[in-house]
């Protein structure tokens, strides 16, 4: 080392120390301490706690921003071709149906009335000043045990198409179906006897209606519900008190009991001890202490909602509740910061189907292989979100308008929330060590703020939280959170020491007499990617090991990225493999970047799981859409529900797996990508009595879509922009 180098090095070391000292000073000199502290409650609606102090005298109060008016659903009209049917429109559909000759003598049970979306080309060409394409409703109705699919044209005031389902399966259960069916066992003597013998009064029963799946001829040709019951004595968490082994199979339409399976007579009903989860009832328990916490938005949120059209930062998209899917995101477009132009990313995305198989082949459990979207509905089971807990302050809440089985509309209030999220994450950063570069104080960091659209479905015991999170760097993160109650099995055992070594339980003991049965969750997303337009290709970018020739390099091996454009559907049936790493791109071959790379988005799997059930197991056949984690199909508007349109008791003849076997061309076409997010769940004691949320996600991430980092010009936060509230005690 020369003298010069040594001295310059020590100079940098010195300046680095000086820099650290400066940093320390900057930190101790907190401008907030010097600012005039005021009671902010008189200034700020967002900071009303009486012991809080506001640290800034000048501000733009958020009342300057027009607050969204509560929507009057009775007079609401659609503004966008994809807007869901309004109350008036649903009423009109009902009127049209009631004078429709085949239904004149007896009005069918309505299982769904939803917007029949106009053709994609019409929607894509529609502009805000245009009149709406004709509004049509897709209706699924049940009459004399036959499923009818109708198309109602609201402009023409008539039914324009009417077909009967000739394949297997029934429409989504209606609430009326379940509530009527669970009454049936109560008047059955055999049921009465066994429940009473187990020490449960009929008045302490809570029964739930479960979908039976499909297992062959024995239960074919009629709509069935499997009813299981719990004791709700001394608890709201009846799910933890199963009357094990008692299953009543009921014909939903005739209210006939087909079968009573009563195998668990020697299994005690777990006690109510420790099952409580309501805060108001748990006041004696110690709390974890934290100061109250919230995100501050002194100028209010930065997004706007016009009906169902959302604008935020560089994103625009359409968001709507859906009875079956939960929420649907459409026409997601991101503004290119370089050109100022909006560019399309995703035409339509939603959770298309779920598959939740339990791993217990016994009589009371084998059939538990739920397909929650098509059997129960992710939207109709999504209840009002809890402000400040499900969604932070400043959230915008959107209502769902759904239809009861008499065809009348109802409002599912606050079903979806929309909020900006700042969780302390970093958007990008770099600091330059003066020691290395000799450059002075370079520390650049940007906060990551995102926009989240959220809903939470409570499909009986389980809660599914589904988030669509938009980032300013163009990334869309789709996240699924699982919470709620386990589906548990009663057992005579109270402790593992009572379990014989050879005895196999279907899951771990999670409480005395309670087994948390092992199960899986799969959520399959429909992602109609339109990257810079509808004509896209799917590209697998495989990382493969290359070996050097002897003497070529000190290295023996290295990785190379090899691109392979999928030609047909089978080419795009992907099973994820850790030791065969790949990226999965959806590109627009005719849209090239400045450097000639095709504009693209990639699907980036997160932590996930695959179904390893036998492919010929009936539930796996019905849910064969989980056979691969990724599929790509050519766009076809009648292929949107991964498990088929009629999932309830369906045999699986109409699944994504069946469509994909046609092996249609997918290169340079309008394509749909399907991604399945999976969880294996081996329950544990911490999941009792209610599960802390477990979540996983996947990303849709721009790849050579932008010419450079699209958030280079994002502004950093500065103290002046963020007036804060402080606890008075620390002032
Ligand atoms: C159940 O059985 C008991 C007698 O075992 C009888 O008193 C009661 O009325 C029965 N309840 C119903 C709803 O049938
Ligand atoms: C569109 O999907 C339906 C249902 O799977 C199918 O019957 C039809 O053949 C498909 N059309 C094309 C062009 O693939």
Image: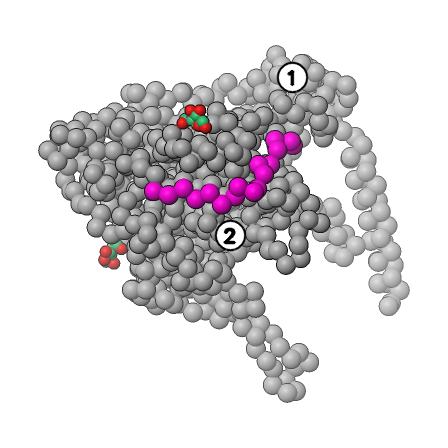
Query: Which label number is shown at residue 173?
Result: none
Residue 270 falls in image quadrant: top right
Residue 266 included in the magenta stretch of the image: yes
| Mark 2 in CB contact with mark 1 (< 8 angstroms) | no
Q: Horizontally, is 435 left or right of 637 in the view?
A: right
Of 273 and 326, which appears nearest the observer? 273
Pick the residue in front: 571 or 22.
Answer: 571
Local crowd size for mark 1, using a 10 Å CA cut-off: few (<14), some (14–19), many (≥20): few
Q: Ligand 2 quadrant?
A: bottom left
Q: Residue at x 48, y 71 (%)?
A: 562
Q: Nearer the viewer, residue 283 or 179?
A: 179
On the image, numbered disc 2 is attached to which residue?
360
Residue furthest to the left: 101
**Mark closer to the observer (2, 1):** 2
Q: Name the secondary structure under disc 1.
A: loop
Residue 99 in the image, given as x and y percentages of width and height = 13, 29
* Left or right: 17 in relation to 476: right
* Rendered position, 599 above or below 543: above
- Please give the name of the residue rendered at 71% of the width and 27% of the height, measured from the top-left corner: 285
The picture quadrant where one finds residue 335 is top left
Residue at 59%, 52% in the rendered image: 505
| Residue 684 seen in the figure | no
Image side of residue 719 versus residue 264, left or right: right
Question: Looking at the image, which is closer to me, 577 or 187?
Answer: 187
**Residue to which mark 1 is pinned:** 49
Extreme residue in the top direction: 42
- Over which residues does the magenta segment extend? 258-274
What's the image's color scheme?
one colour
């Amino acid at each position: 080392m020369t003298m010069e180098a040594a001295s310059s090095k020590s100079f940098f070391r010195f300046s680095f120390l000086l820099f650290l000292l400066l940093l320390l000073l900057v930190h101790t000199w907190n401008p907030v301490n010097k600012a005039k502290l005021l009671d902010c409650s008189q200034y700020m609606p967002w900071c009303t706690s009486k012991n809080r102090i506001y640290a800034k005298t000048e501000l733009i109060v958020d009342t300057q921003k027009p607050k969204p008016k509560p929507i009057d659903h009775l007079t609401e009209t659609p503004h966008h071709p994809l807007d869901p049917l309004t109350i008036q429109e649903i009423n009109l559909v009902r009127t049209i149906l009631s004078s429709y000759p085949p239904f004149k003598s007896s009005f069918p049970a309505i299982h769904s009335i939803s917007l029949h979306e106009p053709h994609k080309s019409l929607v894509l060409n529609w502009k805000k000043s245009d009149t709406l394409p004709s509004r049509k409703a897709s209706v699924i109705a049940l009459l004399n045990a036959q499923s009818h699919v109708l198309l109602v044209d609201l402009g023409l005031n008539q039914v324009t198409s009417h077909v009967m389902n000739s394949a297997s399966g029934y429409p989504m259960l209606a609430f009326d179906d379940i509530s009527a069916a669970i009454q049936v066992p109560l008047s059955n003597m055999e049921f009465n006897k066994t429940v009473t013998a187990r020490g449960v009064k009929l008045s302490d029963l809570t029964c739930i209606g479960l979908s039976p799946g499909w297992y062959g001829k024995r239960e074919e040709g009629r709509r069935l519900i499997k009813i299981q019951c719990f004791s709700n004595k001394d608890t709201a968490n009846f799910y933890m008190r199963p009357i094990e082994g008692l299953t009543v199979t009921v014909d939903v339409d005739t209210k006939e009991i087909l079968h009573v399976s009563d195998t668990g007579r020697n299994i005690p009903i777990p006690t109510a001890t420790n099952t409580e989860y309501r805060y108001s009832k748990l006041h004696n328990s110690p709390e974890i202490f934290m100061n109250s916490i919230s995100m501050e938005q002194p100028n209010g949120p930065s997004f706007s909602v016009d009906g169902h059209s959302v604008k935020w930062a560089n994103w625009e998209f359409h968001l709507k509740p859906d009875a079956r899917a939960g929420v649907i995101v459409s026409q997601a477009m991101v503004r290119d910061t370089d050109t100022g132009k909006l560019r399309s990313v995703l035409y339509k995305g939603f959770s298309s189907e779920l598959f939740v198989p339990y791993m217990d082949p016994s009589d009371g459990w084998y059939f538990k292989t739920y397909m929650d979207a098509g059997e129960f509905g992710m939207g109709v089971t999504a209840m009002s979100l809890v402000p400040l807990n499900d969604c932070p302050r400043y959230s915008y809440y959107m209502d769902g308008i759904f239809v009861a089985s008499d065809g009348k509309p109802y409002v599912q209030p606050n079903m979806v929330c929309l909020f900006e999220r700042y969780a302390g994450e970093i958007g990008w950063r770099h600091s330059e060590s003066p020691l290395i570069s000799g450059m002075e104080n370079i520390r650049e960091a940007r906060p990551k703020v995102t926009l989240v659209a959220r809903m939470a479905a409570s499909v009986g015991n389980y809660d599914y939280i589904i988030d669509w999170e938009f980032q300013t760097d163009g990334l869309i993160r789709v996240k699924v959170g699982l919470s709620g109650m386990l589906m548990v099995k009663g057992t005579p055992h109270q402790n593992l020491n009572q379990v014989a070594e050879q005895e196999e339980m279907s899951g771990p003991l999670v409480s005395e007499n309670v087994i948390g049965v092992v199960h899986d969750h799969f959520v399959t997303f429909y992602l109609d990617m339109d990257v810079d337009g509808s004509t896209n290709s799917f590209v697998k970018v495989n990382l493969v090991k290359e070996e050097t020739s002897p003497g070529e390099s000190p290295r023996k091996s290295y990785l190379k990225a090899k691109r392979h454009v999928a030609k047909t559907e089978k080419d795009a049936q992907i099973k994820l493999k850790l030791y065969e790493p790949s990226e999965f791109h959806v590109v627009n071959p005719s849209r090239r970047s400045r450097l000639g790379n095709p504009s693209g988005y990639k699907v980036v799997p997160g932590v996930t799981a695959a179904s390893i059930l036998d492919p010929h197991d009936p539930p796996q056949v019905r849910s064969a859409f989980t056979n691969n984690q990724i599929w790509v199909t050519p766009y076809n508007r009648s292929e949107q529900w991964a498990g088929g349109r009629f999932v309830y008791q369906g045999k699986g003849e109409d699944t994504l797996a069946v469509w994909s076997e046609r092996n249609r061309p997918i290169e340079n076409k309008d394509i749909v990508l399907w991604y399945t997010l999976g969880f294996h769940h081996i329950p544990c004691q911490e999941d009792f009595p209610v599960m802390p949320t477990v979540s996983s996600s996947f990303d849709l991430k721009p790849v050579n879509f932008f010419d450079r980092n699209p958030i280079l010009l994002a502004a950093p936060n500065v103290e002046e922009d963020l007036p804060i509230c402080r606890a008075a005690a620390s002032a």
